[in-house]
């Protein structure tokens, strides 16, 4: 695999002027490397996936956008007013400041960069980082806290808010649990190995259960080999620089996770961003990259790597994988697929988007995923051909320098994966996968019926509900907590300024009564805060005929 990647540029130079290495005719390429052939408007690749359902991204009414900008404008003006009051000593300044004797030094704190934090975020900080004092399962307990200085500091009251329904954790299959019977093997591994390794895999931190897990992951995904890491974020940020570097091109979806963005930047490769799930935008960049080559020199790119996610965590949308693979093959690029939110959560047997779309895993060059969501543990993996994994074992910083995965976390992943695969002798794993799919579709359909604007795919357990206005985002989180519903709200700069939202994560551990309780509260709060912005009339009837495996009565 790696030899193939490294020889990409050499192969390009062996072809005639009429064809590039991807088989695309370049008869209309001039001496400067740019093509002047005009094409008629078309559908790009022309590849259509029957399994890819339409993902509506409904636009809010114009008045909502206007009021959202107006709201940000008002709080910004008040922010400047409060900064003025702090400067003249009329308001206490609680933020970190430079010492008077260090005023001539290079500043450690940039006032303008911290403007949003001190004037906007501080007023609503109570909606984040809430301390949990129980198992973060389908319900949890919260430590009650209050602030006497507008959220600059908090103090605990000593009271506990019990039985809050958890709609924010990535506990998709409900494996974040404390059932003693289920966790017996994990407890045994703690007694055998302890809780930490205190060494890297390449030194004396390579345990037999690490190798067992890697073989299990490879079997689960249907690939030649796999390697595991102790941190999901570092799996992306440390492995991408090992795969590409200077003279390479990364084509990244505009909504990719920060770990992918960081890894791409650390690699030193050229980065170009294509529109979210837009195959025309991706193909245009691929065509230009192949025909034009590198800037100024127009030499062929050493490697072209397409980086996408299986399920996008803020949008709930699913990658158009068959079309991406078709483009990858057409232009001889490589594909890096991040399945952090999709592995275990989608597909008939929980094997992610490759199973959802029924594509061959061999068509995905680098398969990445994490164990922090569906498996109730920590860490991540890279899977693919044996040559790829062997290369990363010696060249990835995350493999060479990072401490090996904790033994109890390793055993928890093995336990959960065997449960999903049915190797524990039960059907509990399949039951959870089916329950998650049922819960996600039910929750989405009910919210649409109520009139909320929902993003994402029907198969996705991530359900974003658009709130838009900053004041309503804060009010929504507080009103839901008052009704014992724990939600995650997200706003600018994590989302576009006009698309603040609440992100619900559905779990197989949620019962129908829990979901109905959340939906009743959503309906009540939606009416109270006027959050039902959708102008579409939704009918659940088409979903009744969405199955393709009906059996006729004999």
Image (spheres, rainbow, N blue to C red):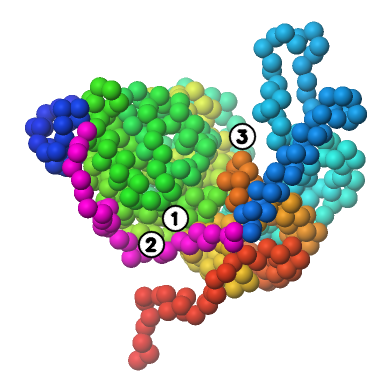
Q: CA distance from mark 3 to mark 2?
A: 45 Å
Indicate which disc, 3 or 1, sits on the residue closer to the N terminus: 3
Q: Which mark is residue 318?
A: 1
Q: Residues within 10 Å of mark 1 (few under 14, many from 20)?
A: many
Q: Is residue 407 left or right of residue 72?
A: left
Q: Would residue 461 be visible to someone looking at this image?
A: no
Seen from the viewer's position, the closer of residues 109 and 497 is 497
Seen from the viewer's position, the closer of residues 223 and 102 is 102
Q: Quadrant of residue 308?
A: top left
Look at the numbered disc 2 and give the secondary structure of its residue.
Answer: loop
Tell me the residue at 56%/37% (across/down): 407
Tell me the residue at 37%/83% (across/down): 551
Range drawn in magenta: 34-62
Q: Is residue 51 magenta?
A: yes
278 in relation to 209, above or below: below
For the residues labelled 1 and 2, say whether their Cβ atoms are less than 8 Å apart: yes
Q: Check disc 2 and report the residue beneath it.
A: 52
Q: Residues within 10 Å of mark 2 (few under 14, many from 20)?
A: some
65 in relation to 529, above or below: above
Q: Which mark is residue 194?
A: 3
Indicate which disc, 3 or 2, sits on the residue closer to the N terminus: 2
Q: Is residue 48 left or right of residue 99?
A: left
x, y (%) of residue 553? 38, 90
Q: Quadrant of residue 86?
A: top right
Tell me the residue at 19%/39% (across/down): 36
x, y (%) of residue 341? 50, 50
Look at the numbered disc 3 and give the secondary structure of its residue.
Answer: loop
Q: Is residue 137 left or right of residue 7?
A: right
């Amino acid at each position: 695999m790696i030899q193939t990647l490294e020889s990409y540029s050499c192969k390009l130079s062996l072809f005639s002027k009429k064809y590039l290495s991807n088989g695309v005719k370049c008869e209309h390429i001039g001496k400067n490397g740019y093509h002047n052939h005009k094409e008629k408007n078309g559908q790009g690749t022309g590849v259509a996936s029957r399994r890819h359902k339409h993902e509506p991204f409904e636009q809010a009414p114009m008045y909502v956008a206007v009021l959202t900008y107006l709201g940000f404008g008002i709080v910004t003006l008040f922010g400047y007013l409060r900064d003025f009051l702090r400067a003249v000593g009329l308001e206490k300044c609680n933020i970190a400041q430079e010492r008077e004797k260090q005023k001539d030094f290079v500043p450690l704190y940039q006032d303008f960069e911290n403007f949003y934090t001190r004037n906007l975020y501080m007023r609503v900080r109570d909606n984040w980082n809430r301390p949990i004092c129980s198992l973060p399962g389908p319900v949890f307990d919260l430590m009650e806290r209050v602030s006497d200085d507008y959220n600059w500091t908090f103090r605990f009251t000593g009271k506990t808010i019990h039985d809050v329904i958890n709609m924010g954790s990535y506990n998709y299959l409900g494996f974040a649990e404390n059932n003693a019977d289920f966790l017996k093997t994990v407890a045994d591994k703690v007694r055998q190995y302890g809780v930490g390794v205190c060494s890297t895999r390449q030194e004396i931190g390579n345990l037999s259960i690490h190798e067992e897990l890697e073989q299990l992951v490879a079997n689960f995904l249907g690939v030649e080999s796999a390697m595991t890491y102790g941190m999901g974020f570092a799996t992306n940020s440390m492995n991408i620089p090992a795969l590409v570097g200077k003279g390479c091109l990364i084509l990244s979806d505009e909504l990719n996770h920060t770990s992918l963005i960081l890894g791409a930047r650390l690699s030193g490769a050229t980065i170009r961003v294509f529109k979210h799930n837009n195959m025309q935008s991706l193909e245009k960049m691929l065509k230009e990259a192949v025909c034009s080559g590198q800037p100024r020199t127009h030499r062929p790119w050493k490697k072209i790597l397409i980086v996408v996610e299986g399920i996008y965590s803020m949008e709930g949308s699913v990658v158009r994988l068959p079309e991406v693979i078709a483009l990858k093959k057409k232009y001889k690029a490589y594909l890096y697929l991040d399945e952090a939110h999709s592995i275990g959560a989608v597909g008939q047997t929980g094997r992610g988007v490759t199973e959802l779309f029924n594509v061959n895993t061999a068509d995905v060059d680098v398969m990445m995923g994490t164990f922090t969501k569906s498996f109730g543990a920590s860490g991540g993996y890279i899977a693919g051909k044996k040559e790829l994994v062997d290369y990363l074992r010696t060249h990835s910083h995350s493999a060479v320098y990072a401490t090996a995965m904790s033994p109890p976390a390793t055993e928890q992943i093995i336990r959960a994966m065997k449960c999903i695969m049915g190797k524990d002798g039960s059907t509990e794993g399949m039951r959870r996968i089916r329950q998650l799919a049922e819960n996600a579709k039910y929750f989405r359909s009910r919210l649409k019926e109520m009139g909320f604007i929902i993003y994402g795919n029907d198969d996705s357990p991530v359900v974003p509900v658009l709130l838009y206005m900053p004041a309503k985002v804060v009010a929504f989180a507080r009103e839901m907590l008052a009704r014992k519903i724990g939600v995650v709200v997200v706003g600018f700069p994590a989302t576009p300024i006009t698309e603040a939202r609440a992100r619900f994560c559905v779990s197989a551990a949620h019962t129908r009564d829990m979901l109905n309780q959340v939906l009743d509260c959503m309906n009540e709060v939606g009416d109270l805060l006027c959050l039902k912005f959708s102008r579409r009339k939704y009918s659940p009837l088409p979903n009744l005929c969405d199955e393709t495996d009906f059996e006729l009565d004999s």
